[in-house]
Amino acid sequence: MYIALQLILVVAGVLLLVHGGRQRRWSLGIAGGAILVGTWIFFEILDLWGEYLWFEALGFADRFWTVTLTQWGLAAAGAAVGAVVVAVLTRPAGGDVGARRRVAAGVGALVGGLWGFGHWEAWLRFLHGVDAGRVEPVLGRDAGFYMFSLPFLDAVTILLLLLAGASLVASLIPVASSRGEDGGKPPPAGDAFERVRPDLRLHLAAGVILLVLGVERWLQRYHLLDSDWGAVHGAGWTDVHVRLPAYAATAVITAAFGLALLIPAARP
């Protein structure tokens, strides 16, 4: 009965959407969309309520609320951060807001929301991390850093790379469109500034990508301590004397190139 009701509501919503689109009756399309969204929200609430009753019966209601509020709170925070980051990296000349920028910000919000919903456990470990009281001899970090902080830092770099990549794609579209329309001819003198601004946005997005990649390479140094490339598990001679300085040098060089791209984009 539970699944049958879901199917009936979903089919009704899809039929209204299709019929409204064909007949150009937007009221039917809106009604169909509302039925689909309402069905998803309703059954999500039912699932959430069932889980709550189960956790409460076992005496773990506090754990249920901690996990649930963290999931949705981090998803909301991730969506806000994603939208803001993409909006800033795709900011056009004069501050005007176009359809592409709104779509890009929406994609950033979606990416950030999904990231937040999927990394709530890493966030809780990072938030409640403690020192383990044992320091590793290679990089001098407490073992608690590897258990509580490093996984979340890795996740943050992934999020920033995704957002910067989405911003780069969104910035490439108007540049390609403008150059395709004028056949590759140089722009008139009065339009020079407007044509340069998209290229500066490319510098900004590409610079952020390189900067984050530099941070990611730096964090990879810590992952060498659980390396499985050698004869034994853990950091071997090659890891410590070759890969470790190579990662550090790559991180610095990549971040330097990123900063070099950010400098022209930061100029007024």
Image (cartoon, rainbow, N blue to C red):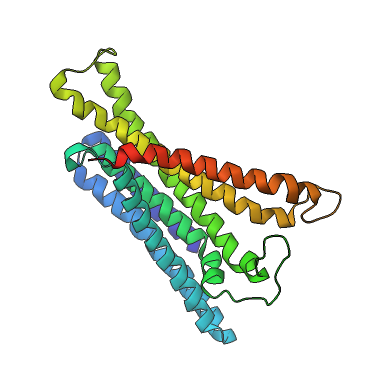
The image quadrant where one finds the C terminus is top left
* Percent coordinates x, y for residue 101 in the rendering: 27, 41
Taking the image as shown, residue 241 lies to the left or right of residue 245, namely: right
Q: Is residue 191 or residue 155 the one in the foreground? A: 191
Measured along the vertical axis of the image, is residue 101 above or below residue 186? below
The image quarter containing residue 74 is: bottom left
Name the residue rendered at 48%, 68% in the picture.
Answer: 47
Taking the image as shown, residue 255 lies to the left or right of residue 167, namely: right
Taking the image as shown, residue 24 lies to the left or right of residue 53, namely: left
* Percent coordinates x, y for residue 13 in the rendering: 34, 49
Name the residue rendered at 52%, 40% in the picture.
Answer: 254
Name the residue rendered at 19%, 28% in the picture.
Answer: 193
Taking the image as shown, residue 36 lies to the left or right of residue 241, namely: left
Measured along the vertical axis of the image, is residue 169 above or below residue 216? above
Measured along the vertical axis of the image, is residue 102 above or below residue 55? above
Regarding residue 49, the answer to whether it shows in the image is yes
Count the numbered circles shown. 0
Q: In the orientation shown, which residue stands out farthest toward the left?
A: 190
Q: Is residue 258 or residue 120 the one in the foreground? A: 258
Regarding residue 12, the answer to whether it shows in the image is no
The image quarter containing residue 132 is: bottom right
Q: In the orientation shown, which residue stands out farthest toward the right?
A: 231
The image quarter containing residue 144 is: bottom right
Measured along the vertical axis of the image, is residue 184 above or below residue 106? above
* Percent coordinates x, y for residue 29 in the rendering: 26, 45
